[in-house]
Image (cartoon, coloured by chain):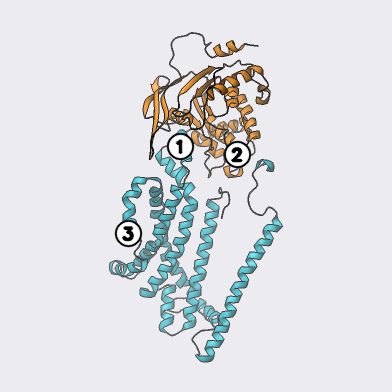
Chain colours: A orange, B cyan
Amino acid sequence: MPLESDIKDAGKTGEPGPARPPKLSLRGVSKRFETRRGTVRAVDETDLDVEEGEFLTIVGPSGCGKSTMLMIASGLETPSAGTIVVDGKPAGRPGPDRSVVFQQFALFPHMNVARNIEYGLKVAGVKKSERHAAVEQQVAIMGLEGFQKAYPSELSGGMQQRVAIARALVLQPSLLFMDEPFGALDAQTRTQMQDEMARLRTRMTSTVLFVTHSVEEAVYLGTRIIVMSARPGRIIANLPIGEDAPWKGMAIEAAMGQPQFNAVREKVWNLLHNKSE
Amino acid sequence: MIVSTEMLITKAGPSRWYQLDRSRWYDAGLGIGSVIALFVLWAVAAVITNHHHAGLVPTPVQVAKTLANLTTHKFAGHTLPMHVLSSLSRWGLGFVFAIVLGVPLGILFGAIRLVREAVSPIFEFLRYIPPFAWIPPAVLWFGSGQTSQALIVFIAAFPAIVISTQVGASNVDPALLRASRTLGAGALRRLGEVITPISLPGVFAGVRVAASNGWMALIAAELIGGRVGVGFLIAQGEDNGAIDIVMVGMLAIAVTAAILDLVVIALSKRLTRWRKSAA
C-alpha cells in the first residue's frame, strides 16, 4: 500500500509530454455582489487549473463561494474579473460540453424521465433512433429501468438526482460540474449515491468539478481536493489524491475505516477549521 | 410500465378506491341535494307570489314546459338550441382570439422584463375600462353584428388570460432555465419548450375565468343590440312580457357556462397531467 507521501504525489505523475493546455483554467477570477449593505466578495482573485480526466472535489464552509466559482466555470454566471479558459480557448456561453448537475435536481417537471434525459440530445439535433438508444443506455447505467415514463414529481429525491445525472452524462460532456449534488438527499440515499458516483467514475471520460461541504465526500470521490476559505472565497490548499489511493474501489463505509483515508480527512478538516497540523 | 411502488413517493389523497368512491358520492350527493333545495324554494316562491300577483314568477313546471316548447318551436326567429349555438359561435370567435393573442403576450410579460415594462402600463390602463363600455364604440365601428359582439368577448376575456399566463410564466423556477441553458437550449427553445408548458396551469386558471367573463359580456351585448342569440331571446321575452321565456334563457345561459367550464377543466387536467396534484 502506498504511504501518505505517495498519495500526495500521485496527482502529478503524468508522463511529461508536449505542453498541453489544462482542460479548464480559471485566471484571476473574482465575483462581487452589490447588496444594500455594500459589496460582497464571493470569490476573490482565484487561479485554478484542472487537467483532463481529473475528478476535482472542492470543499469549503457554506457561503465560501465554491458554488459561485463552479457556476462561473460552467458559464452560467459571469465573473466580475478574470477569465475562464477551456482547452486553451476562452470559454463562451454555457452549453452541452459543460454539463451541470444542480443540488435541487432542476428536472423539467412537464417531461417524463426519458424526455428529461433526451432533452439535451434533442437540442443538439441528434437523430431520434440514436437519441433513444443513448437514453436507454443511460437509463440502464443509472438504474432507472421501468421509470422512463414517470414524471419527476412521482420520484424520490435520490431517483430525481439519478435522472439529473443521466441527463448530464448522456451528452458525454468533456466537463461535468456537480454543485453539491447529494446535499439535498437523506443520509442513506446520499451514501448510496456516493458509492454509485465512485462506480460511475470508472466508466466516465469527463473531467469533473464536484463541489461539496462534506469532507468525507470530497476525500472519497476526489482525485484532487481543493480546500476553500470562508468568504471571501480563496483556495487555501490543493491536495492531490490520485487514482490509486487505497480506498479507491471501496464503498464509502469501508473507506472510512481506512487509516490513510482518515489521515487525509483529518488534514482537510484541520485546514477547514484553521488548525495547524 | 413496471414501477416498484416503494420507490415512488406516495401521492397525496385517498389511497384506496372505496375511500375515493365514498367521498365522491358524498360530494355529488351534497351538490344534487342543494340544487333540489333551490328548485323547491323556487316553487314555493312562485306559489306564494302567484297568490298575490299572478304571472310574476313562473313555477319550475311552467318553465320546463316553455323549455320543451322552445326547443322545437321558433321564438325570436330561431329555436332555443339555435340561439345558444349562435351565441356560442360569437363567443368562440372572441375567445379564440383572446387565447391566441393573450397567451403569447402573457408569456412574454412573464419571461422578459423589458416587454413587461414597455407594454404593461398601456395594458393596465385599458383593462380598467369595463367590457360593456366598449359596446357603443364597437357597434359604431363594426355595426351591431357578429364582429362587434365577438370583439366584446375578446375584450372581456383577454386581460384574465394575459395576467394569469404572466403569473404562471414568472413563477417558472429559474434553476430550470439555467438547466436548459447548460443543455444547449437557446432563448426560443426556453420560451417554447420550458417556460410555456410549465406556465400551462396558470394559463388554464386564466382561461377558465376568461371563458365565463367572455360569455357574460356576450349575453350583455346581445341584450343591448342583437338579432339572434340567448341574450336576444331574453330581451324579446321581456318585450313580450313572457317571464317564462326570460327564465328559460337564463337557465340556458347558466347551463352553457357550466358545460364550457367543465370542458376547460377537462382539457386543463389532460394537458397538465405532470403536476403533482392535478386540481
Dot 2: element: helix
Q: Quadrant of the N terminus of chain A?
A: top right
Q: Which mark is residue B125?
A: 3
Residue B208 image offset from top left, x and y in percent: 48, 60
Kindly identify the amino acid type of the residue bearing the numbered disc 1: Arg
Quadrant of residue A197 in the image? Answer: top right
Q: Is residue B118 above or below residue A7?
A: below
Quadrant of residue A91 in the image? Answer: top left
Query: Can residue A56 be seen in the rendering of this structure?
Result: no
Check chain identity for marks 1 and 3: say if they share one. yes
Q: Is residue B140 left or right of residue B260?
A: left
**Pointer 2 with pointer 1, Cβ within 8 A:** no
Kindly identify the amino acid type of the residue bearing the numbered disc 2: Gly
Q: Nearer the viewer, residue B218 or A70?
A: A70
- Residue at 45% from the left image edge and 62% from the top image edge: B211
Q: Which mark is residue A157?
A: 2
Kindly identify the amino acid type of the residue bearing the numbered disc 3: Phe
- Badge 3: residue crowd in 10 Å (few <14, some 14–19, many ≥20): few
- Residue at 59% from the left image edge and 19% from the top image edge: A264
Q: Chain of mark 3?
A: B
Q: Quadrant of the C terminus of chain A?
A: top right
